[in-house]
Image (tube, rainbow, N blue to C red):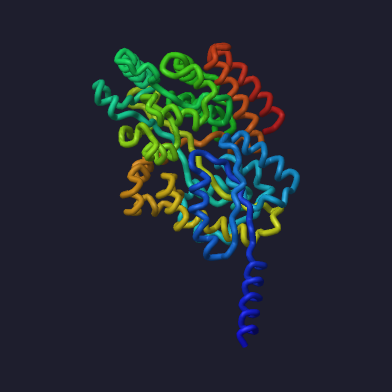
């Protein structure tokens, strides 16, 4: 009898193992993203017996998109789920499973605009995981020391950053810079420059109705101001900075101000941070006193590949990660902004991550990139824009000259059909 029972147990374990599914999840990794992912999927793995395997991608969204597009065009069966940027839905929709029916409850709990951004031709092609909007990080200890206020305009930021930088260097703090941000030639520069231009009243590059608006005096004024920053209040190397390079300078205590996303708040208060407890955040500056701030709408979603041979398990993981339990865990672990409206009133989140309810103001002022009017051409439009901006920042021509050339390029693209 004992042998029979032992054999039955072994058989049951073998059957259980055979039924377990291993799903692959491709995602860009920024900061401590690997640890956060592992913590997030634990409850799902324990509940289902399945395994979630992370396929780490570069943190650059430009590099991620290029690799995703290659895999999907080839009908790659090895990747089951893709973590996608908010702007990619129109370009990759044909490769993803429609999640409308399986995620009805989740969709109803989300901010409507976020669900709309992931819906293409009536199909919900990705589920929101967290939203994003950048803010101005500032050293409250240094502002207090030098009797400065949080700048409300970009001109004030330029002046305040320079005054504190010069005063600190005179006292021996030779490595301090006034402002670090993302000025490399990639999607992050599109975000930074869009915020500047929009806050100056210079439009959104391409407007919702498809009109090309980028070549105007206000847009040029915003970019010409930014061109004064490298080598002045920002290191020359900022022209090669992405999010992590900026955070590295900031977190070692070598910057007064930083433009970055919410993930940097959690890490900036970590045990290994030189600025823990010394900083706060505010909405990004405006173009003029009393004007409006503009923060690029970001955010990440999860999509299920239609080429996956493990779609049932993949959909299970996607709906779990997009649901209330996982979104709350992510907010507590990584200070990521939930897409579920109710979580902004969650007492535990407010206590452990007080920045999240405060960030709602930043998020509500967010401006979308022009992916909707440009559709499948968005990445080429963005590439031409960030290159024009980078040329301006590098001193290769004035903003007026670069924006005039950009307008001609975009008109030609539009004439050929977005």
Report the residue at 63% width, 70% height from top.
Answer: 16
The answer to which of 104 and 383 lies nearer the viewer is 383
Locate the N terminus by quadrant.
Answer: bottom right
Q: Is residue 226 visible?
A: yes
Report the residue at 65% width, 54% height from top.
Answer: 97
Toward which corner of the image does residue 68 lie, by quadrant? top right
State left or right for residue 21 relative to residue 132: right
**For residue 40, above or below residue 413:** below
Report x, y in % for residue 385. Answer: 58, 25
Locate the C terminus by quadrant.
Answer: top right
The answer to which of 2 and 75 lies nearer the viewer is 2
Report x, y in % for residue 198. Answer: 46, 27
Q: Is residue 125 visible?
A: no
Q: How many marks on residues?
A: 0
The answer to which of 366 and 23 lies nearer the viewer is 23
Toward which corner of the image does residue 314 lie, by quadrant? bottom right
């Amino acid at each position: 009898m004992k042998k029979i029972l032992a054999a039955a147990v072994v058989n049951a374990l073998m059957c259980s193992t055979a039924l377990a599914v291993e799903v692959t999840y491709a995602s860009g990794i920024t900061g401590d993203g690997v640890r956060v992912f592992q913590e997030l999927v634990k409850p799902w793995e324990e509940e289902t017996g399945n395994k979630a395997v992370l396929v780490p991608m570069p943190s650059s969204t430009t590099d991620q998109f290029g690799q995703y597009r290659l895999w999907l065009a080839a009908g790659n069966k090895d990747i089951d789920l893709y973590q996608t940027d908010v702007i990619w839905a129109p370009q990759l929709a044909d490769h993803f499973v429609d999640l409308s029916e399986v995620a009805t409850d989740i969709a109803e709990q989300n901010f409507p605009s976020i669900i709309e951004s992931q819906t293409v031709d009536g199909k919900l092609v990705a589920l929101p995981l967290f939203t994003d909007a950048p803010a101005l990080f500032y050293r409250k200890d240094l502002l207090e020391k030098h009797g400065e206020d949080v700048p409300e305009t970009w001109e004030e930021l330029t002046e305040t950053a320079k005054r504190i930088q010069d005063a600190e260097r005179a006292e021996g703090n030779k490595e301090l810079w006034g402002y670090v941000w993302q000025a490399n030639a990639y999607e992050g520069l599109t975000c930074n420059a869009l915020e500047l231009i929009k806050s100056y009243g210079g439009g959104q590059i391409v407007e919702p109705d498809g009109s090309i608006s980028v070549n105007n005096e206000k847009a040029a004024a915003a970019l010409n101001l930014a061109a004064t920053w490298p080598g002045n209040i920002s290191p020359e190397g900022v022209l090669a900075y992405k999010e992590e390079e900026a955070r590295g300078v900031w977190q070692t205590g070598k910057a007064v101000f930083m433009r970055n996303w919410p993930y940097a708040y959690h890490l900036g208060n970590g045990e290994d941070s030189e600025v823990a407890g010394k900083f706060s955040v505010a909405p990004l500056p405006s173009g003029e006193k009393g004007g409006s701030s503009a923060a690029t709408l970001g955010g990440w979603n999860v999509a299920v590949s239609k080429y996956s041979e493990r779609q049932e398990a993949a959909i299970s993981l996607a709906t779990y990660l997009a649901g209330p339990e996982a979104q709350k865990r992510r907010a507590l672990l990584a200070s990521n902004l939930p897409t579920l409206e109710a979580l902004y009133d969650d007492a535990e989140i407010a206590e452990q991550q007080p920045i999240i309810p405060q960030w709602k103001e930043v998020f509500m002022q967010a401006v979308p990139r022009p992916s909707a009017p440009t559709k499948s051409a968005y990445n080429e439009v963005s590439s031409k824009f960030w290159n024009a901006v980078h040329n301006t920042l590098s001193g290769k021509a004035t903003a007026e000259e670069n924006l005039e050339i950009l307008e001609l390029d975009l008109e030609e693209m539009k004439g050929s059909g977005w």
